[in-house]
Amino acid sequence: MIQLSYSTFGLTGLDFLDAIDAVAAAGYAGVEIAFHRRQFNPFEIDGDALAAVRARLHATGIAPACVATASHFFTPSRPHEPSLITLDLAGRKRRIDLVKRGIRVARRLGSPLVTFGSGFLRDEHVRNAAADPGELLADSIHECLREIRDDEDITLLIEPEPGMYIETMAQALALIDAVGSPRFRLHIDLCHAYCSERDHLAALGEAAPHARYLHISDARAGYNLRIVADAEDLAFDLQAASTLVYFADTADYLLVDRRHPLYFRDQAPDRRRRQRIDALLAQAGVQGVVRSIDYASLPVGASPLDDEIFTYLISVPGLSFHVLERAWPIIAWLRGARGPALVNAMVANTLTGIVHFHEIPGEGTLDLEASFKALTENGFHGYGSVELYHHVASWQQALVDSYRHLAPLTGASVRPA
């Protein structure tokens, strides 16, 4: 059985207690307690604040389904950093401390689950290939587990996410085996599974016995685009994704795309660069003349596409944030931030081409009914929290429409307001 919950990460414009009231009034059985810098900050909340939250949960009759330790917490412009696999021990300890604070909040509120993600391989990992991120992650998780007392029922959960070190459910299950603790299990995000699993229904069925918690949102296909640094061993699969190649010596980019080969540059390429461009396009099987785009002509400043582009860029591993942030105007130009769009679909960086952008349930192409069936028929039971942080501005619609769509699929009934 799946009980419906809603994450406060989609309600960050509200006072925290008001967010709990809104979730209860909409009919949900539970609420995900999500850390947030401005709404529910674990470095600022005290015992009295937690007592007020616990009292409000009791008054509304909804359960604290899970404590989500914030991905965007430390530096909002660079989410998930530092992570549990950051090479700098001081950085890892900051994330470990945040997860431990999640355990303490769960203890005070009576929540049985605390969730987090692995983080991304960044340029520091590429430069230091001898460092094993798997060992760092396992060690970090063991340190977090030490916070849980022997006599309490709290379980830590790993959430696979597109582009992360732990991206697929198979990788998560292998990590769970490596950690070897009954207090460490799987958190499935249905949007993430749709993005990262070739056969997401089969993967859900295999993972269901190990899962303790769900995130629910919808998603749809987009324009799949990799960003990689130029290297001798580059390989292209344009059926799966176009590729934006970064040239470190000039900070220029080549879009390897069958329909739109483009070179974004500050200055005209020299003969050697033109030869490299021709070689890469030939290797990828791209014909036609490459179009040169002056980087200074690209759109800058805010646009309605910012949320989409931000979510996309932070999911690209292995490159510095400077490289990714310099690519922002290119993505904005392709998507039509100023002028007609060359790419009409939302941009994606996933194994399947599905966009990692959390849509309101029922507004994408994910078969949620089949997903729930794959889970419950293979032993999953617990809370499924709707996570719609892309819809904070329209939270009322997102809250109500999600419940209206999901209740018939899960057998939930409308609770009295």
Image (cartoon, rainbow, N blue to C red):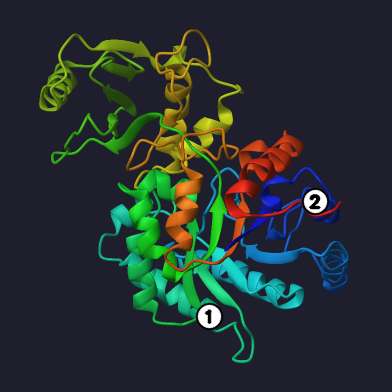
Q: Nearest the camera: 406 or 51? A: 406
Q: Amino acid at mark 2?
A: Ala
Question: Residue placed farthest to the bottom in the image?
Answer: 151
Q: Position of residue 95 (x, y in %)?
A: 55, 65
User: In the image, which disc is placed on residue 19?
Assistant: 2
Where in the figure is residue 108, as x and y percent of width and height?
A: 75, 76
Which is closer to the viewer, label 2 or label 1? Answer: 2
Quarter where residue 224 is shown: top left
26 or 142: nearer the eye?
26
Mark 2 vs 1, N-terminal side: 2
Q: Is residue 271 in view from this perspective?
A: yes
Instruction: Provide residue 89's location: percent of width, then percent of height.
Output: 47, 69
In the picture shown, does residue 243 fall above or below 358?
A: above
Would you place residue 359 above or below residue 411 in this image?
A: above
Q: How many marks?
A: 2
Q: For the residue carrying disc 2, how many other residues have a C-alpha within 10 Å: few (<14), some (14-19), or many (20+)?
A: many
415 above or below 255? below
Between the residue at mark 2 and the residue at mark 1, the CA separation in whole angstroms equals 29 Å
Q: Which residue is mark 1?
A: 145
Horizontal side of 229 relative to 56 (left or right) equals left
Secondary element at tag 1: helix
